[in-house]
Image (cartoon, rainbow, N blue to C red):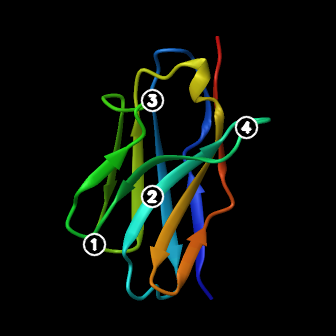
Amino acid sequence: QVRLVESGGGLVQPGGSLRLSCAGSGTIAGIKVMGWHRQAPGKDRELVATIIPSGATNYADSVKGRFSISRDNAQRTYLQMSSLTPEDTATYYCMIGTPWGNYWGQGTQVTVSS
């Protein structure tokens, strides 16, 4: 059974940094994309960043230049977040997309506050 587990969330002051990690257990065949989404209270879930097997990345305009997504050769993806602002406060979800469907993690909370 496939399971994605995020880690690395927490409370950080404005201007600070965090690194989120996502590890996939079980065998995930045909990975087409790995990514991070986030959902703030009262808002829809939104795309933050994606990375495909070639290494090409895509970012939401709101995080360009501040966030960086990466992956290793296994089923792990990372999100390095810098220059965080209170507007980045949300639950962050890891996602792995395959031709047969998407897998989601349970989410990790990121709170940016002084």
Q: Quadrant of the C terminus?
A: top right
Q: On the rendered structure, is 101 left or right of 70?
A: right
SS at mark 4 in the image: loop
Instruction: Give x and y (percent) for residue 54.
Output: 20, 67
Instruction: List the residue tagged with mark 2.
Output: 35
Task: Examine the rendered structure and indicate whether residue 110 appears above or below residue 70.
Answer: above
Neighbourhood count class around disc 3 (C-alpha, 10 Å): few under 14, some 14–19, many 20 upward = few
Instruction: List the residue tagged with mark 4.
Output: 43
Instruction: Give x and y (percent) for residue 83.
Output: 42, 20
Instruction: List the residue tagged with mark 3.
Output: 62
Instruction: Give x and y (percent) for residue 92.
Output: 60, 47
Instruction: Give x and y (percent) for residue 62.
Output: 45, 29
Task: Examine the rendered structure and indicate whether residue 29 appears above or below residue 72.
Answer: below
Q: Residue most toward the left? A: 54
CA gap, disc 1 to disc 2? 15 Å
CA gap, disc 2 to disc 3? 16 Å
SS at mark 1 in the image: loop
- Residue 73 badge: 1
SS at mark 2 in the image: strand
Task: Examine the rendered structure and indicate whether residue 111 appears above or below residue 98.
Answer: above
> Residue at (22%, 61%) from the top-left corner?
55
Instruction: Out of 51 and 71, give the one closest to the viewer.
Output: 51
**Foreground: disc 1 or disc 2:** 2
**Which circle's residue, 1 or 2, is located before the other in the chain?**
2
**Foreground: disc 4 or disc 2:** 4
**Which circle's residue, 4 or 1, is located before the other in the chain?**
4
